[in-house]
Image: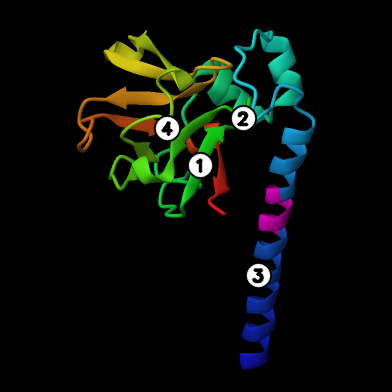
Amino acid sequence: MKKYISIRLLSCLSASILLFASCNSMAQTDQKKNPYYSRTDTTTLHVSDQEWKKVLSADLYEVARHAATERAFTGKYYEFDVKGTYYCAACGNALFRSDSKFSTTCGWPSFYEPIRVNGVIYKADLSYGMNRTEVLCGRCNAHLGHVFDDGPNPTGKRFCMNSISLDFEPQK
């Protein structure tokens, strides 16, 4: 019985490692096939929706281009506490430093300020009968999430972002 459980546990562990490795390599492959992805170019992009559909994964496309929202508490950066920089997953624009990230119970990674004032843009969002402020990437107009006025000091803002809209690079 113990041998059976050990073999089963080992099988599950191996499958988990393979799944993690394949997801990680898929994200890198997507960046390589995306000609608009750059962590140094801050030029505003004017790319058609059809072109974005070709270069983004299906789930990133839905969030970034159609303002979909990932389920709360499921994003890879929700309870993620590593020093580094968060970039737009669609275009590579620098968005947030980990120093501005804080713990919340809202279910999405939250920050109190962007790296650059023009790194993000704001748009009124009156969908679903609510009055919110949508946050878009300042370079490619990808939907990132929403900003609320209930964050911590020094800004009082809570930039509530979809993990799928973010790429992360650890501090070296």
Amino acid at dot 3: Cys
Q: CA distance from mark 2 to mark 1?
A: 11 Å
Q: Amino acid at mark 4?
A: Met
Left or right of residue 166: residue 149: left
Classify mark 1: helix, strand or loop.
Answer: strand
Could you tell me what secondary structure mostly forms the magenta stretch? helix
Give amino acid for label 1.
Answer: Thr
Mark 3 lies on a secondary structure that is helix
Instruction: Tell me, yes or no, if residue 91 can be seen here.
Output: yes
Q: What segment carries the magenta color? A: 19-24
Residue 68 badge: none
Q: Is residue 1 visible?
A: no
On screen, residue 89 above or below 75: above
Residue at 26% across, 25% down: 148
- Location of mark 4 (residue): 161
Q: CA distance from mark 3 to mark 4?
A: 31 Å
